Structures are given as structure tokens and as C-alpha cells.
Amino acid sequence: MKDFGSSSDPAVQAQLDRLAALSVPQGRLGLDTVRALLSRLGDPHLALPPVFHVAGTNGKGSTCAFLRAMLEAQGLRVHATTSPHLVRYNERIRVAGELIGDARLAALLQEVLDAGEDLAPSFFEVTIAAAFAEFARVPADACVVEVGLGGRFDATNVIPAPAACGIAALGIDHERFLLAPEDGTPTRPLARIAFEKAGIAKSGVPLVTQAYPGEAAEEVVRAAQRAGASLAMRGRDWQARLEGKALRYSDSLGTLTLPLPALAGPHQPENAALAVAMLRHQDAVRIDAEALASGIRTADWPARLQRLAHGPLAGAREVWLDGGHNPSAGAILAEHFAGQRLHLILGMIAGKDPSALTGPLSDNLASLTVVPVPGHDHHPPEAFGGNARAAPDVPSALAAVPGDGLPVLIAGSLYLAGEVLRLNGEWPD
């Protein structure tokens, strides 16, 4: 997966080139390598401010965005590490509210890569070690950490005692990694996904989750019991529902009436509610209802049902951007655009289900144009059926869309989404 990025800063690019040369030995699982690397850096993961650790198939990044916005609305300084980046690698490491600068990033990556040169760490292990090393050095009040892939063996899962762990929506994705046969693990797909995600549970730490279908819920309950975590599951320990233009949240502490998110999409109130529940089920930092409400209103998370600003790429058209690529994302897009015709520009990495978006959106499609995902192996147009046409890139695809006033949706990959944001001059900050 070629997600290493590029930089206009030569010192940063030199370290990104080193990152790009890393590979993971086939079949290597576990946290031994990242722990060894962190040990050489002085075990920074043991010196972090209170950590909010979030896993999930869909919504974990948005939940992290809500958490950060809520904590900052309380007046707190917040570190955050999320993935993948969209335009610049710097997006992965946010230090006390600001994206890490190029000069500091170059020095930090060099330090970590030099320390682990003989360990053969992965790209993500180096990234997480670098983030934790910087977070331990710069004072802050809280830390938001997004799981990269899965949970049980994710490099972020070295944090011994987070303030709270959260699990967002579950669905089938990354099958090659998360559904690989392994003795002692569930055999049914969604149960196995739940087992992997719930691997972040820790003894004595709140594990706050959404509600899941039976077999997935059972695995989450079992994981919490094995770890000795304090489980707070939606529908059992906390509730959230829409009431008109408000989000009604309740738990054992009482009931809150909160605003709806500014972030578009029917799923975002769900992610906001999970962030609220995580903050209400921990006692490491104080958070009041005003900060929760403010964070819901102000949270920003690019390339997730984002309407592009008028710019060099989008022009004056109504253009939407979403990095979703699995069936759960397709269902969310179909709900958002229900009853509305649109032009879909689609780029999907090879190995993803070609029908994940086109299936749910089949009744919406006025046209379907398939584009490459820059720097990645991708599905050709014929993977999407006989009505799909090809374009060499997004600007060409947009130029060929009829001027009929219908909205345009660009979707299928966060890597494609990053290129779209770059072309439209909307760099995440």
C-alpha cells in the first residue's frame, strides 16, 4: 500500500523515502516490534496524557474528530494521531492542536528510523512510535489515538491504560488481514471483526461501544470480560436518538439535548454520540455539556461526505467527496443521497469490492465514470459493469460530466480523496 506521501521539504522527503523502503515480513503479527522500537525511544507511550483510543470499521476517524473538538472546546490542549493522511504525511501527527511542522517532522522521523533500523519495523509502526515520542515531549491535557487497522495487533495497542477505549460501527473490510484464519478466533466474519476491534479493551478501562448485531455484540462482551474492562454499550448502558433537530443523549449521569453535527451524513450523529459517551464514561479529564455541544458543532473531518468549496477543480458545481470504499460506506452514501440523481466518479483500490458503492447507489446513478487511484493498483472500468466509462483522471472525468445541474460525487478511496483535495486547494490543516 503506497500511502507514504510526498513533501515539498527535502528533509521530510528524505525520511519519507526511507519509510517507503520499509516492508513487513509476511505473516508477522503482534506488538513485539513496536514495543522494542518504543523501548529504544524511552517508552514514550508510558508518558502520554490521558488517551482516548478509538477502533471501528467506519466512523472511528469522525469519532476522533468529535473527541478532539469537544476536548479543545473545554480549553484543553490535545494531541492526536489519525490515519491515513489525505494530502500531507504531517496530518498524521497533531501536536497540542497543530499539525507537526516540516522541520520537526524530518528530525523526528530520522530519530525513529535510526533507532529501529535493525528491527525491520513497518511504516505504521514507525509512524506511531514517532507520534508517541513527540506527544510525550510536548505538554498537553489529552491525547486522541485512532486505530490504524483492526485493534488487537494494531501498533497503537501498546497503551497500557487509556482514559477510555471506543469502538465505532462494525462492518466487513480489510478481509485479507482481519479475516485470515487463526486458531482460537471466531469463524463468522462479523464476529471475527468484532473480536479484532475489541482487542483494544484494557483492564479497568471503560470500553464504550455502539450497538451491534447479536454475534458481534457477544464477542465485544466476551472481550471486555476477558480484559476486565468496564463495558458501556449503546442500548444497554447509554442511549442516543434524534429528536427533531437535536441529538438526545442519556446515560446513568442524566440526559443531554445536544445539537446535530455540522458534518454531513446520517452517520455523524452516531459518531458524535459515541464521542459523548466516551467522555461521559471516564474520569481522567473534566468535560461539561457546553463543551460537548460546541465540539459537535465545530468538528471537521475532511473527505467524509464533504461538499467541496468552489475551487480550481470543482468550479462552481455541487461536488461531494467521500473516501468510503466498503458496503457500510455505500449504505451511508445511499441514505444521504436518497431519491436524488447524481454523477458518480469512482476510483477504488484493487482488492476492494467493486459493488460496495455502486450497489447501494444503483438507483441514483445518472452516470458512472471510473478513474485511477494515483500511485495504487486499482479496479478497471469493466469491474463496474457495462455502463461505466473511463477517464484518465478526476479533472478529465469532471470535464466530461454533463452540465445538467445534478450533483457530482467523487468516492471510492481516501487516497483518491486526498488528490482531489490537493487539486481543489483544500489542504487539511
Image (spheres, rainbow, N blue to C red):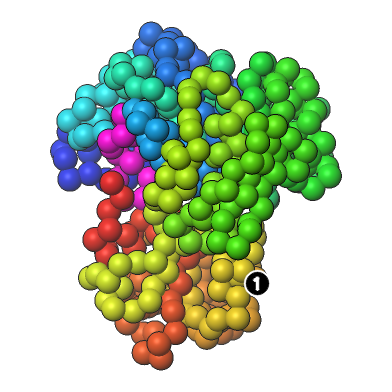
- Residue 251, visible in the rendered structure: yes
**Residue appearing at x 79%, y 34% in the figure:** 219
Q: Which residue is mark 1?
A: 359
**In which image quadrant can residue 390 be found?**
bottom left
**Residue appearing at x 70%, y 44% in the figure:** 239
- Residue 61, visible in the rendered structure: no
Q: Amino acid at mark 1?
A: Gly
Report the front residue among 105 and 380.
Answer: 105
Place of residue 236 in the rendered image (x, y in percent of width and height, measured from the top left)? 77, 38
Taking 322 as reference, is 235 left or right? right
Q: Residues within 10 Å of mark 1 (few under 14, many from 20)?
A: some
**Residue appearing at x 53%, y 83% in the figure:** 341
Q: Is residue 251 magenta?
A: no
Q: Which residues are magenta?
A: 84-99
Place of residue 163 in the rendered image (x, y in percent of width and height, measured from the top left)? 54, 22
Taking 257 as reference, is 123 left or right? left
